[in-house]
Image (cartoon, rainbow, N blue to C red):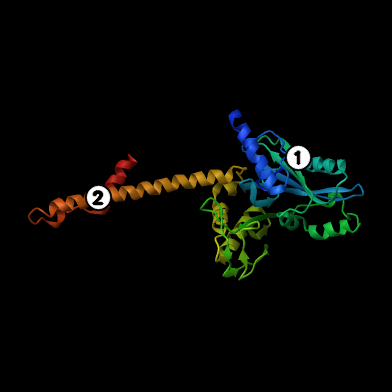
């Protein structure tokens, strides 16, 4: 059993297989009460794409378009958007029709999500069915205009679906940022505590679904998600611009949050171009570590220059008085060292 990033392991080498099985079983048992495991093909740098469906149990199943959920940490979604910038009309129809067949095969009745992995050649692989509304369902609501919560309740009450598949139309683009009480610059470590200040953003196309308020206690015993920030625009570019503004306005104090990380994502040229996959965050963290290493080198360079300067000043202090021109400048030394390093 696995989900939300728990009870899942990637095996790169056959020798890792026994320990990976033990770890996955142990985690699955402690998290879900089920130590059962299954094996599946690992896809290198795929996209995580899911299809929203509605099924009334009377033979009518509709697909409401896909969501791109590739930006994840520890196999848990962080940023979602609809529609996917990678999915074309042909693939959308294929994913939708496959989802309808799956729902019909099991007599499904409810709102739900069929999840897939999609490789770079647009081949897709079934993952699972989530027999409920997903955290990220608002992005589908924003681009379809359909209230999924209301439709789920009406279906449960025995009502049918009043739409046809050809009635479903995707308008504009929506992005959701999951606001976690985590420190994104410290391996997304949990940040429990009391929220002392909360200022939510607003404006055209902005929706904030929050479960906290000023004075709320963020516990270590529950999922760290505290809010969902959604931005809609007439196209992806406008949705990104609106999300940037909303993130700048969002203020949460008392706990660390992923807001700064989301700001970084929205400014990242790769994200803006739609060049994302499930390794996106890992690549971003590696890039930040390299930048950090460069900063440390600069600090070491200045420290070395300071050491040389102090050493020379110590020698000079034992000499007769010297002119100011003979004294070395720390900044000149640092600049010279930097030029040598650049060569």
* Whether label 2 touches label 1, CB < 8 Å: no
Q: Position of residue 213 (x, y in %)?
A: 64, 69
Between 41 and 244, the residue placed more toward the observer is 41
Report if residue 1 is visible in the image: yes
Q: Quadrant of residue 116?
A: top right
Q: Nearer the viewer, mark 2 or mark 1?
A: 2
Q: Disc 1 marks which residue? A: 90
Q: Earlier in the sequence, mark 2 or mark 1?
A: 1
Q: CA distance from mark 2 to mark 1?
A: 65 Å
SS for callout 2: helix
Q: Residues within 10 Å of mark 2 (few under 14, many from 20)?
A: few
Q: How far across and how far down the image is residue 245, in percent?
A: 58, 62
Based on the displayed image, in which of its 4 quarters is residue 123 positioned? top right
Count of marks, rendered view: 2
Could you say which disc has been placed on residue 307 in the image? 2
Q: Find numbered disc 1 in the image and state the secondary structure of the residue it sits on.
A: helix
- Residue at the farthest left position: 320
On-image quarter of the N terminus: top right
> In the picture shown, does residue 234 fall above or below 3?
below
Q: Residue at x 30, y 44 (%)?
A: 339
Q: Which of the two residues, 36 or 146, is positioned nearer the viewer here?
A: 36
């Amino acid at each position: 059993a696995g989900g939300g990033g728990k009870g899942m392991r990637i095996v790169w080498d056959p020798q890792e297989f026994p320990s990976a099985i033990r770890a996955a079983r142990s985690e699955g048992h402690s998290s879900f009460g089920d130590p059962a495991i299954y094996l599946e093909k690992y896809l290198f740098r795929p996209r995580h794409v899911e299809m929203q469906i509605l099924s009334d149990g009377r033979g009518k199943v509709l697909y409401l378009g896909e969501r791109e959920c590739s930006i994840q940490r520890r196999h848990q979604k962080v940023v979602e958007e609809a529609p996917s910038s990678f999915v074309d009309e042909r693939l959308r129809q294929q994913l939708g029709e496959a989802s309808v067949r799956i729902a019909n095969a099991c007599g499904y009745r409810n709102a739900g999500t069929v999840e897939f992995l999609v490789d770079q050649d647009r081949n897709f692989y079934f993952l699972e069915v989530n027999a409920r509304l997903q955290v990220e369902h608002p992005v589908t609501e924003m681009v379809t205009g359909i209230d999924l919560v209301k439709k789920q309740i009406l279906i449960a009450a025995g009502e049918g679906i009043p739409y046809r598949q050809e009635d479903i139309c995707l308008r504009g683009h929506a992005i959701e940022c999951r606001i976690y009480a985590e420190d994104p610059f410290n391996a997304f470590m949990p940040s429990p505590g009391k929220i002392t200040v909360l200022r939510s953003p607003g404006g055209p196309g902005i929706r904030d679904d929050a479960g906290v308020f000023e004075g709320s206690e963020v516990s270590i015993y529950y999922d760290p998600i505290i809010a969902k920030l959604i931005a809609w625009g007439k196209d992806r570019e406008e949705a990104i611009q609106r999300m940037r503004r909303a993130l700048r306005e969002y203020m949460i104090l008392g706990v660390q949050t992923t807001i700064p990380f989301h700001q970084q994502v929205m400014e990242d040229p790769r994200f803006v171009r739609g060049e994302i996959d499930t390794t996106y965050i890992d690549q971003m963290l590696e890039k930040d570590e390299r930048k950090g290493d460069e900063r440390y080198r600069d600090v070491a360079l200045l420290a070395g220059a300071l050491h040389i300067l102090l050493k020379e000043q110590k020698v000079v202090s034992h000499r007769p008085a010297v002119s100011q021109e003979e004294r070395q400048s720390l900044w000149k030394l640092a600049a010279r060292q930097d030029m040598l390093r650049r060569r």
